[in-house]
Every structure is written in C-alpha cells, then in structure tokens.
Image (spheres, grey):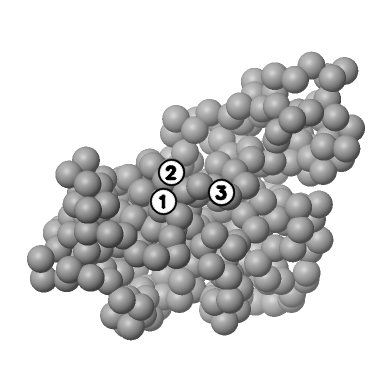
C-alpha cells in the first residue's frame, strides 16, 4: 500500500483550503502545459494534502479555458492518490435546494472541444467510466459531512455542459425531464483524466441555484449564485478539514479499480507505441511501465 495524499480541486468560491499546516507552494511543470495555479502543499492532522484552485486565484480561467490535463498530471506528479473535486452546480430538483451538497455518482458529459484524454494516436487506451466515482472516497466524504452536520445527499447524476453561458430554458427542462440531478461546467473531462491517471476521484457538487427550469427562478445570474457560493465555501472548508483529519494514513485500494484503471486499457501493441507520446505519459503510466 502507498501513503495517502489527498488532492483538493477547488471550484467557484473555493480558492483556498483554510487550516493547512506547514504550507508551501510550488509551480509544477507538466508536458501538457501549465496547471491552473501553483500547487499548495500542507497537512491537516496527519494527512498530507495538495490544493489546486481550478479557475486560478482570482477566478481567471473559464470552464473551457482550464488545462485539465495539466492539472491532473501535476497532481499525479506530486504523489496524489485521491482527488476530491469541489464544484458549484445548478439543481434540477426541488428537493436539491441551494446550499445542499450532492455527492454525485454519475456524469453525463455534454462538453465539446476540450482535451479529454492523455492518450491518443500512437498509444491508444480505453479506460472504463461505467462507475466514475470511487465509492470508498465518496463514503468518507459522506461520513465527514454527517459528522459536521452539513446537509448532503449521497448519489445523483451531474450533467457537465460546456458553458460559459448558463442553460437555455429548453435545455434545462429537457435535462430535468430526463431525471438528471445537477448541472455544472467543470467535472468533465476532469473525472475521465483522473481515471486515466489511476487516481481515485469523487465530486462534491455544491448547489447554488435551481437552474432556469424553476418558475420562481427562471433565470440564473452570477450575483445570486455568488451569495450562495460564499456560504457553501465555508461549509466546504469544514467538510474538507474533517475529511482530512479522519483520512486513513494509507491509500485504500479502490473496490472498482479506479487506481488500477490501466491494467487492461492499453490496446496499442508495445512495439507500435509512439516514443514521444510515451515520454509525455511517463508519470501517468508509471505503475504499469515499471511492473
């Protein structure tokens, strides 16, 4: 077993992780470009943590402008074993009210134009995304939320749209009619890349609004969202601090194999693999390359 190192990717309103001790910052270079910001290293209790603000400090990156590959590669490069992603979202259900946290277990990816894989021509791989969330990690988040008495729902489907515009009413009503739970702009391709990097991944979807299907809230604007985001951020900090304090010292093997996702994923014959791409993949593929 390996030492557990928890990566926290902060979304809208979550630009820092209060309580980190022995704090230091480092800019980490990757073959995929620059991550969103410098990584912040520290610990809470006995757990080592690495924090990365997804949009950069000051919220300078749009959902489509984030270098998701660089972010995940950088976290893998510094030894992160588990990623907790924090993401603001809209709700399609009356019972999923602003301020509630949804610990989602499924995604519908409606993004386009984003680099969604580390692999490609010269080294092809197909990882399973049937169950995109690591169940043990999600359970630990649920336990931390319950311990802190933070309202949450366990389970739900997150629609990831391209953005940066909010939904049209036709889109919102369509997703609601299909039974989806929340909508956001950033969990994809982040979850796919974490799976390729063999990092256990879970998302805390923080509800900020009812999207535009709701008759009493028939449009979404940044000003109203920010008010809820600020309240959510305080609860997110409490939840994450509790999660880290209670986190096991050793990384727990994932029961669905998210930390072994490449075992049967590579299809390109070894002799046909592109050396230049393999060099870029050296950190992502480090476990199977050294078996």
Picture mark count? 3
Q: Which residue is disc 1 drawn over?
A: 160
Q: Crowding at label 3, few (<14), some or many (≥20) Cα neighbours within 10 Å?
A: few
- The CA distance from mark 2 to mark 3 is 12 Å
Q: Position of residue 166 (x, y in %)?
A: 35, 64
The reply to whether residue 78 is visible in this rendering is no
Q: Position of residue 107 (x, y in %)?
A: 40, 43
Which of these two is toward me, 171 or 203? 171
- Residue 109, disc: 2
Give above or below for 217 relative to 252.
below
- Residue 113, disc: 3
Query: Is disc 1 placed on a helix, strand or loop?
Result: strand
The residue at 42%/46% (across/down) is 110
The residue at 33%/83% (across/down) is 223
Residue furthest out toward the left: 215
Query: Is disc 3 placed on a helix, strand or loop?
Result: loop
Task: Name the image quarter holding the C terminus.
Answer: top right
Q: Earlier in the sequence, mark 2 or mark 1?
A: 2
| Callout in the foreground (1, 3) | 3
Q: Crowding at label 1, few (<14), some or many (≥20) Cα neighbours within 10 Å?
A: many
Q: Position of residue 272 (x, y in %)?
A: 84, 20
């Amino acid at each position: 077993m390996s030492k557990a190192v928890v990566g926290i990717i902060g979304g809208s309103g979550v630009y820092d992780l209060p309580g980190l001790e022995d704090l230091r910052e480092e800019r980490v270079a990757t073959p995929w470009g620059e991550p969103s910001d410098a990584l912040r290293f520290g610990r809470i209790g006995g757990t080592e943590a690495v924090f990365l603000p997804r949009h950069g400090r000051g919220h300078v990156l749009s959902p489509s402008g984030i270098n998701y590959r660089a972010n995940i590669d950088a976290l893998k490069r510094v030894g992160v074993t588990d990623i907790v992603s924090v993401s603001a979202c809209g709700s399609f259900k009356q019972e999923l009210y602003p301020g509630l946290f949804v610990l989602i277990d499924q995604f519908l990816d409606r993004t386009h134009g984003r680099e969604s894989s580390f692999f490609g021509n010269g080294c092809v791989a197909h990882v399973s995304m049937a169950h995109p969330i690591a169940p043990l990690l999600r359970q630990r988040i649920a336990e931390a939320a319950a311990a802190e008495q933070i309202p949450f729902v366990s389970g739900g489907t997150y629609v990831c749209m391209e953005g940066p515009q909010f939904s049209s009413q036709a889109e919102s009503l369509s997703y609601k009619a299909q039974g989806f739970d929340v909508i956001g702009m950033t969990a994809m391709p982040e979850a796919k890349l974490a799976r390729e990097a063999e990092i256990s991944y879970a998302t805390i979807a923080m509800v900020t609004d009812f999207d535009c299907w709701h008759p009493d809230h028939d449009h979404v604007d940044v000003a109203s969202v920010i008010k809820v985001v600020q309240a959510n951020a305080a609860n997110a900090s409490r939840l994450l601090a509790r999660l880290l304090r209670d986190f096991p010292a050793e990384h727990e093997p994932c029961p669905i194999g998210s930390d072994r996702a490449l075992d049967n994923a590579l299809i390109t014959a070894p002799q046909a693999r592109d050396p230049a791409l393999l060099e870029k993949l050296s950190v992502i593929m480090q476990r199977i390359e050294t078996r």
